[in-house]
């Protein structure tokens, strides 16, 4: 081990983590150029190579590496939340037609196709421009860009490093939600913990908000698949001993490392554009049913990335490449990359729930940089495998259970609903409390679902 493992969780959450989490985090600390520690978030569970909920930073000047497994297959999977200005009562009166209209407007499910088909030229521009490109095409407002990480466009993208097959997979998938744990939820703000931060974010108790959770679809998955193979070869060529072949990596300064960095940044742009297009279609639905509603974006944050950032390590500023796999960047107050509107408060940290359970909004803290390289959890985290969930429940049972609790579900796959049953996840209340108590992020508001379009 070249660095320690640091787990942010209470005793109960640690006991609930599968043994593989500690083993995988220990393996990460053997990689060259690691700085600080391998940080494990409270929602961590077993993943491909890196644990999901794992954070690790590498210094290129000290032989540091980049790992496709440390970013994950759904590159830049993330969440964005919009406020509506509507009350719970106003929305619940039209909940069924709203659910049907959203389900009809946003393509959802495995292999779903968009009404958009990108030409080669449009694909190139999208991979370079991200949400900035989407807004220029009419999918949203310029004001949205201020409320998106990287202002909607990841600099340094290299579309030339994205294969023809990855592009082909994405050509008809822009504006699609996908499957698995991806969702579009209509939620009500049912508790405020930090009134000052909530006011800064525009959150009011009893108001309805919308959260969209998805990523870079087929393109990101294809890039991850292709570069894992290239990195296995690169690791051999550079004499990097891997305790687990799933930790395949390449030196940041190598040809493969730079190529992946450029392709991954293009995939980040794809995810940002994807969530922007979905937002546009959601706005169209709300404009039909609730003409007075104005859907303003609160924030958009990704949780499967590798970002180049400056952090103070042992009193010195260092430029690092921070892998966050199933972890959210959580910059504290005053950070220059936080939108001006939040700069005195800190960055919104959006924590996704699991259909029937709450989601949360937290805020980055002054301590988070020193504690966790400005990182926090991203969701509840799985407590059991999809196969275990399928043995425990049917999708119809889950839909009925949720309906009795006041949550309407629309999904093309009852099997998918069973796999993503709320009971298959950790208790998100405990997860966010652990993050709050560890001071890596601070609780702001609790969101309760009333309608879920599930992938």
Image: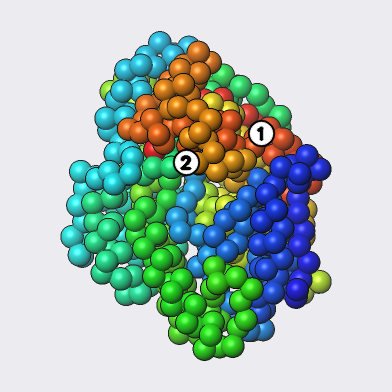
Query: Residue 25 in the image: x percent, y percent?
Result: 69, 62
Q: Which mark is residue 427?
A: 1
Q: Residue 239 appears in which quarter of the rendering?
A: bottom right
Quadrant holding the N terminus: bottom right
Which residue does the image show at 39% across and 60% down from the upper left?
220
Indicate the secondary structure of the residue bearing disc 2: loop
Mark yes or no: residue 170 visible. yes
Residue under pointer 2: 181
Query: Residue 302 in the image: x percent, y percent?
Result: 51, 52
Q: Closer to the N terminus: mark 1 or mark 2?
A: 2
Q: Residue 202 appears in which quarter of the rendering?
A: top right
Which residue does the image show at 46% across and 32% down from the upper left?
418
Q: How is the image coloured?
A: rainbow
Indicate the secondary structure of the residue bearing disc 1: loop
Query: Residue 314 in the image: x percent, y percent?
Result: 81, 71
Task: Say if 156 sits above or below 114 in the image.
Answer: below
Which residue does the image show at 66% across and 79% down from the upper left?
32
Mark yes or no: residue 82 visible. no
Which residue does the image show at 66% across and 62% down from the upper left?
24
Foreground pick, 381 / 93: 381
Q: Residue 309 appears in which quarter of the rendering?
A: bottom right
Foreground pick, 38 / 268: 38
Left or right of 400 on screen, residue 164: left
Disc 2 crowd, CA 10 A, few/some/many (<14, 14-19, 20+): some
Foreground pick, 12 / 150: 12
Query: Residue 141 in the image: x percent, y percent?
Result: 36, 44
Task: Say if 377 sits above or below 51 in the image.
Answer: above
Left or right of 169 on screen, residue 147: right
Real-space Cα separation, disc 1 to disc 2, in angstroms: 16 Å
């Amino acid at each position: 081990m070249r660095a320690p493992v640091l787990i942010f969780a209470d005793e109960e959450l640690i006991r609930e983590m599968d043994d593989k989490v500690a083993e995988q985090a220990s393996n990460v600390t053997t990689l060259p150029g690691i700085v600080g520690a391998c940080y494990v978030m409270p929602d961590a569970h077993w993943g491909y190579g890196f644990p999901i909920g794992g954070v690790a930073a590498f210094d290129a000047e000290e032989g540091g590496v980049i790992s496709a497994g440390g970013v994950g297959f759904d590159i830049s999977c993330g969440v964005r939340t919009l406020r509506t200005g509507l009350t719970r009562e106003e929305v619940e009166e039209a909940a069924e037609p709203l659910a049907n209209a959203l389900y009809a407007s946003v393509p959802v499910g495995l292999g779903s196709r968009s009404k958009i088909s990108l030409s080669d030229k449009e694909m190139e521009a999208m991979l370079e421009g991200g949400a900035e490109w989407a807004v220029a095409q009419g999918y949203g407002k310029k004001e949205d860009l201020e409320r998106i990480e990287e202002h909607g466009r990841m600099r340094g993208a290299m579309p030339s490093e994205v294969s023809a097959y990855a592009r082909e997979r994405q050509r008809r998938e822009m504006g699609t939600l996908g499957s698995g744990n991806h969702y579009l939820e209509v939620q009500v703000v049912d508790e405020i913990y930090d009134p000052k931060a909530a006011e800064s974010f525009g959150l009011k108790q009893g108001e309805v908000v919308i959260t969209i959770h998805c990523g870079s679809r087929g393109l990101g998955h294809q890039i991850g698949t292709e570069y894992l193979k290239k990195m296995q070869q690169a690791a051999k060529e550079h004499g990097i001993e891997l305790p687990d072949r799933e930790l395949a990596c390449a030196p940041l300064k190598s040809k493969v490392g730079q190529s992946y960095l450029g392709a991954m940044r293009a995939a980040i742009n794809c995810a940002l554009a994807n969530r922007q297009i979905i937002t546009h279609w959601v706005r169209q639905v709300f404009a039909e049913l609730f003409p007075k509603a104005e859907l303003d974006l609160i924030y958009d944050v990704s949780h499967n990335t590798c970002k180049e950032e400056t952090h103070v390590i042992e009193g010195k500023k260092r430029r690092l490449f921070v892998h966050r796999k199933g972890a959210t960047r959580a910059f504290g107050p005053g950070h220059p990359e936080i939108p001006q509107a939040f700069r005195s408060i800190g960055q919104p940290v959006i924590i996704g729930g699991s259909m029937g359970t709450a989601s949360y909004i937290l805020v980055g803290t002054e301590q988070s940089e020193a504690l966790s390289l400005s990182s926090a959890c991203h969701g509840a985290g799985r407590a059991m495998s999809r196969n275990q969930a399928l043995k425990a429940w049917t999708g119809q049972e889950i839909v009925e259970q949720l309906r009795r609790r006041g949550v309407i579900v629309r999904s093309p796959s009852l099997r998918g609903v069973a796999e993503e049953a709320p009971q298959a996840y950790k208790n998100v209340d405990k997860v966010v409390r652990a993050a709050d108590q560890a001071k890596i992020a601070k609780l702001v508001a609790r969101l309760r679902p009333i309608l879920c379009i599930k992938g």
